[in-house]
Image (cartoon, rainbow, N blue to C red):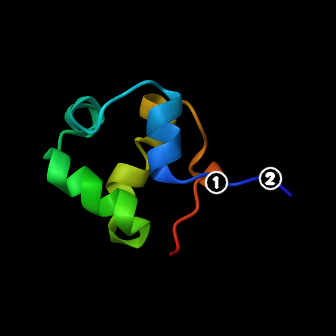
Amino acid sequence: MTKKISLEAARVLMGLSQQEAAEKFNVHYQTLAKWEENPKLMKYEYVEKIPSIYMVSPDAIFFWK
């Protein structure tokens, strides 16, 4: 079983601030903060961007609280 990490952990591992990561997702940093608090809010179109931004599979992220 693959260990899962949070969106915040994936961002931190990439060395990105919320502002920097939000720019890569093309959203406001407060939107990213909401996703990190409750990943279920993240729409699929943004989930698809996780590998290119955080260099991890979306399967490595947990999307429940």
Q: Please say if 38 is above or below 6.
A: below
Q: Residues within 10 Å of mark 2 (few under 14, many from 20)?
A: few
> How many circles with numbers are drawn on the protein?
2
> N-terminal of the two: label 2 or label 1?
2
User: Residue under circle 1?
Assistant: 59
* CA distance separating discs 2 and 1: 8 Å
Residue 8 at what x, y percent from top left? Answer: 44, 47
Residue 56 at what x, y percent from top left? Answer: 59, 37
Give SS at disc 1: helix
Residue type at mark 2 is: Thr
Query: Quick check: 25 left or right of 39?
Result: left
Looking at the image, the residue that sits furthest to the left is 28
Q: Residue at x 34, y 51 (%)?
A: 46
Which mark, residue 2?
2
Looking at the image, the residue that sits furthest to the bottom is 65
Residue 17 at what x, y percent from top left? Answer: 30, 31
Residue type at mark 1 is: Asp
Q: Residue at x 28, y 39 (%)?
A: 18
Q: Please say if 56 is above or below 7.
A: above
- Looking at the image, do the residues carrying marks 2 and 1 touch, with CB atoms under 8 Å apart? yes
Q: Residue at x 47, y 50 (%)?
A: 7
Give SS at disc 2: loop
Residue 39 at what x, y percent from top left? Answer: 41, 65
Q: Please say if 28 is above or below 34.
A: above
Looking at the image, the residue that sits furthest to the right is 1
